Image (spheres, rainbow, N blue to C red):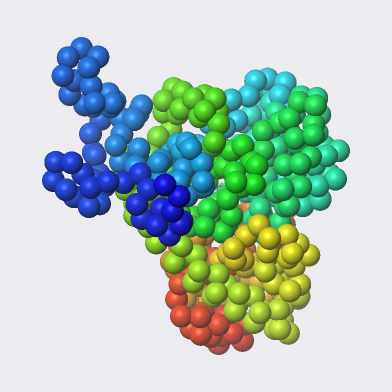
Amino acid sequence: MSKHIETLAIHAGQEPEVITGAVMTPIFQSSTYAQEGVGKHKGYEYSRTGNPTRTALEANLAALEGAEYGLAFASGMAATDAVLRMLSPGDHILAGNDVYGGTFRLFDKEFKRYGLVFSYVNTSNPDQVESGLRETTKIVWLETPTNPLLNITDLVKVVEILQSASNPPLLVVDNTFATPYLQRPIELGADVVVHSTTKYLGGHSDVIGGAVVTQSEEIYTRLAFLQNAVGAVPGPLDCFLVLRGLKTLPVRMDRHASNAEAIANYLAAHPLVDKVYYPFHISHPHREIAMTQMLNGGGMVSFVMKEGAKAAKRVAEGTVLFTLAESLGGVESLIEIPAVMTHASVSGSSLEVDPGLVRLSVGLEHVDDLLEDLENAFQGSN
Ligand SMILES: *Cc1c(COP(=O)(O)O)cnc(C)c1O
């Protein structure tokens, strides 16, 4: 069955429940399952290993990424942790130099202690990926667009480079910012996609969750083992909330993007703004690549204030509709200062960001109200 993503988002992995006909997948809030005889069961034994609400979510996520296998985790970081656990001491990971701050923290503060070896390059420049590869490289880990600078990596180029390596490493793409509605890395040759479902997939700022999707049975089997062995699984209510969010992903992403595009254009023309970062904006250095591998520019916009950190703080504290908060991808607009909020954990490292940078997660409010809120914050008149 090859259906459009709008249809898959609503139906994949889900059938009316057999006993009652309930159209929405029930929240199977049960830790264990009655067995008909010893070892004779209906596919579920214990909810760390498997839970029907989670199964529906996992099948849906796989379908949206155009892949065979999905696994849901308790958070995006738990999903990342599971992927890294496939490796052994001495293995090298080549990572993007502006990955999510929490990802860098997990790599640098935890997995390094266990003997994994990390190096960081600007993956937007494929030459740096090529020259960063080592004999021991097992994973190339990247985000596109990145957080918070919205840099774009040419996935097809990187796949080409990795496939011509003597011992091709796995390409892992954190697809949180783009979502499968905008970009499907596995269809472009990536081996593994990682998500924080906390963000656009859940979409309503009411749940923490993560996911891993792959086309490889071998990787899936290893990760399913880790999911059960480590146990960082999402509860059934959390799975339900993400599943519910996914149903409207395509319509939400279209509106996130049209609002974000209007805001990027407004900011680019604003006298107090030095620079705007938005993948589909005319000023973006990787705009052409973005336009070939993404359906639209997404809902994230970052910008630098001409007057630096103080001015950035004034704007971030001066909006009313844009809530000053970490996270992203919900229906409501958020504003934050990465240097002191989401990216505080990379301060002092090579991943440190400009203190005058402001990041917006553009929500689904009316764009005129959002533009007015920003203008009032710029004028200091909110
Ligand atoms: C939020 C985020 C994560 C971590 O996900 P959690 O659900 O917060 O654990 C990983 N990658 C990206 C790009 C993120 O935005």
Residue beneath the point at 59% across and 55% down: 183
Q: In the rendering, at what x and y percent does residue 281 appear?
A: 69, 72
- Residue at the outermost front position: 1
- Which is nearer the eye, 218 or 354? 218
Residue beneath the point at 36% across and 55% down: 10
Q: In the rendering, at what x and y percent does residue 283 appear?
A: 76, 72
Describe residue 338's horizontal placement relative to residue 4 as left or right.
right
Q: Quadrant of residue 331 in the image? A: bottom left
- Do we see residue 349 in this rendering? no
Residue beneath the point at 59% across and 38% down: 192
- Residue at the outermost left position: 20
- Which is nearer the eye, 104 or 64? 64
Describe residue 320's horizontal placement relative to residue 159 as left or right.
left
- Residue at the outermost top position: 38
Q: In the rendering, at what x and y percent does residue 134 appear?
A: 81, 29
- Do we see residue 379 in this rendering? yes
